[in-house]
Image (cartoon, rainbow, N blue to C red):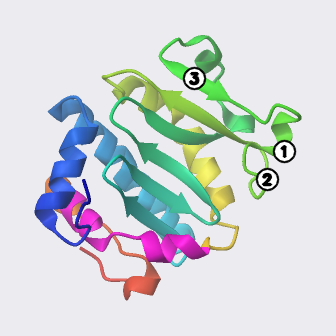
């Protein structure tokens, strides 16, 4: 199924399919909106939101920093600020660079690591990781923009999320930097 990234109804359909319930959707989209606000404040021309029929992904600098799939949340964290309690939490899967965790899963962002969240009620885990995720976004924002980010950005997804949450969200500078 192809989606129309410029159609609010199509965007809504994809977003509805990614979340098991309304509470998880609201919590997850607020976490995404906070991540967008951080990225925009740090580097308004180096981020973008990609909408596909199977996922919603926030890219900052050269890397993905957050993605939502129908059965899990894929969130990048900073190794140095990883909350220790996550290492024993069976609601998450952690992945580091196998050769040297300090190199990061993305070479352009040292100490980057993956935290996949499998809990259908992610609010507690998202609250635990928000500090480490913020540091990761700060580090990613220092890298150049991936050329695919601008092409893949979906302004309509930003509009939909802003409307759904009832809060202002920015567009990247390369979209004219409008605020919705």
Asked which quadrant contains residue 144, the reply is bottom right
115 or 85, which lies in front?
115
Magenta stretch: residue 107 in it? no
Q: Is residue 87 left or right of residue 28?
A: right
Count the marks. Answer: 3
Q: Which residue is mark 2?
A: 107
Q: Position of residue 91 (x, y in %)?
A: 47, 16
On the image, the x and y values in percent for residue 84 come to 66, 20
Mark 2 and mark 3 lie on one chain; the one further toward the N terminus is: 3
Tell me the residue at 65%/64% (across/down).
62
Residue 34 in view here: yes
Residues under numbered marks 1 and 2 in contact, where contact means CB atoms less than 8 Å apart: yes
Measured in 3D between alpha carbons, the distance from the residue under mark 1 to the one under mark 3, in whole angstroms, is: 19 Å
Residues tagged 2 and 3 counted as in contact (Cβ below 8 A): no
Q: Is residue 31 above or below residue 36?
A: above
- 86 w.r.t. 50: above or below: above
Residue tagged 3: 93
Measure the alpha-carbon separation of dots 1 and 2: 6 Å
Q: SS class of the residue under badge 1?
A: helix
Bounds of the magenta span? Answer: 147-161
Q: Which mark is residue 103?
A: 1
Residue sitting at x 24%, y 61%: 3
């Amino acid at each position: 199924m192809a989606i129309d990234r410029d159609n609010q109804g199509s965007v809504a359909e994809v977003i509805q399919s990614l979340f098991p319930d309304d509470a998880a959707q609201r919590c997850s989209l607020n976490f995404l909106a906070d991540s967008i606000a951080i990225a925009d404040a740090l580097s308004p021309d180096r981020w973008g939101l990609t909408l596909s029929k199977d996922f919603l992904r926030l890219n900052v600098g050269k890397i993905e920093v957050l993605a939502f799939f129908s059965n899990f949340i894929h969130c990048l964290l900073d190794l140095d600020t990883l909350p220790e309690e996550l290492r024993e939490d069976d609601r998450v899967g952690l992945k580091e660079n196998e050769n040297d965790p300090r190199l990061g899963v993305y070479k352009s962002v040292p100490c980057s690591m993956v935290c996949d969240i499998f809990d259908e009620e992610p609010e507690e885990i998202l609250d635990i990781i928000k500090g480490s995720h913020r540091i990761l976004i700060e580090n990613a924002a220092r890298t150049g923009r991936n050329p695919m980010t601008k092409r893949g950005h979906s302004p309509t997804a930003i509009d939909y999320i802003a409307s759904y949450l009832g809060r202002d969200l920015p567009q990247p500078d390369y979209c004219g930097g409008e605020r919705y």
